[in-house]
Image (spheres, grey):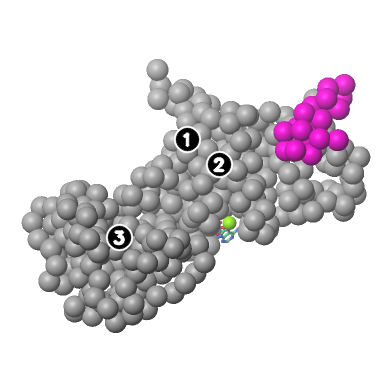
Amino acid sequence: MDARAKTGVSIRGATRRYGAVTALDDVSLDIAPGEFVSLLGPSGSGKTTLLGILGGFVQPSSGSVWVGERDITFAPPHKRNIGIVFQNYALFPHMTVGENVAFSLRARREPKSTWARRVAEALAMVELKGYESRSVHQLSGGQKQRVALARAIVFQPQLILMDEPLSALDKQLRETMQIELRRLHRQLGATIVNVTHDQREALTMSDRVAVLKDGKLVQIDTPERLYDRPCDAFVASFIGEATLLDVSRAGDNAVRLGNTLLRTAHPLPRGDKLLLAVQTEKLIIDGENRHADANRLSCRVTEVLYQGESLRVFASLADGTAISLRQPGGHDARQRIPAPGAAMTVALDPQDTIVVPA
Ligand code: ADP
Ligand code: MG
């Protein structure tokens, strides 16, 4: 069987140029049926362009898009059976909630006799049961986004594209909606491609995350792999709260940070310029030397910042290199943090000792 037959959506070598700007640069990506993939990257990295190529509103300069065995590179958006959700909802203000959702069915010439039932089902899915006759003006931001979602799922598309769907919502509502979207994804079984610049949101919702930089796909992996094994300094610094420190090669599975030898459980990358990428919460204060197999760093505490649920501890190594770590805010963990000026030993597991090319 052709590999594509088992694949939800495939993008093959997609490039998009706007004059001298290469918005998307030779991106290939296979998305499995029913998978939830987030496109993550800073502003201008090509996320919307890639989503547009999937949706059919941006034409690639070269490359192709496949759904199963069908080449849809030049198929117009309405022929793609794709549901789309935008950041700004794009609801029709003069229509009711029900009319907004039914619009997708009207546009696809679905039999009118089915509209009421299908709109009711879609609204129930997004927890807006019975909202059909409400005016769009009466809704909060979160409710508007749910209506936009209902409109995108009411015709049971095989693929749902979302461009920063939660970025207009406040933090608390955003986190609630992240959990809701995951639930909805499980219920629908549809393939979802979601654009976000929020790494936490991407890690929370996705089966896999594709990290984009300057139009290039840098790494695509599960949230755990992306967090534990970033492939380069960009991914390491974009995911979580990593510190990047210059290190030198010291054998096959070891590097030197100043005078300290650190063992890593992973093969070192090629090249002479290496960086240790260390997430703040992977450094453990090791007062009682409990972590026998761990790497150890001797340092001196420079500052402790209380930040509510956690504390950020800044310290410097003997050669002055600054490091920082995060400790839980509970009483027990706080007791273990030495005062500024005091000496401290921190442990770093060889599994968490990640070295990337500089
Ligand atoms: P993102 O969604 O990650 O912020 P975009 O895909 O919107 O990034 O844009 C990627 C790059 O392509 C940017 O440099 C942007 O300015 C450029 N770009 C996107 N769309 C157009 C367009 N219609 N005309 C010219 N340049 C564009
Ligand atoms: Mg964008």
Mark 3 packing: few (<14 Cα in 10 Å), some, or many (20+)?
Answer: some
* C-alpha separation, residue under disc 1 versus residue under disc 3: 37 Å
Dot 2 amino acid type: Val
Horizontal and vertical percent for residue 166? 64, 52
Mark 1 packing: few (<14 Cα in 10 Å), some, or many (20+)?
Answer: many
Magenta span of residues: 111-130
Dot 1 amino acid type: Ile
* Residue 276 as seen in the image, left or right of residue 221: left
Q: Which residue is mark 1?
A: 31
Numbered disc in front, either 1 or 3: 3
* Residue 63 as seen in the image, left or right of residue 295: right
- Residue that sits furthest to the left in the current view: 251
* C-alpha separation, residue under disc 2 versus residue under disc 1: 9 Å
Where on the picture, by quarter, is residue 242? bottom left
Horizontal and vertical percent for residue 254? 13, 57
Residue 193 is labelled as: 2
- As displayed, is residue 183 above or below residue 49? above
Q: Earlier in the sequence, mark 1 or mark 3?
A: 1
Cβ atoms at labels 2 and 1 below 8 Å apart = yes
Q: Residue at x 43, y 68 (%)?
A: 311
SS label for mark 1? strand
Numbered disc in front, either 2 or 3: 3
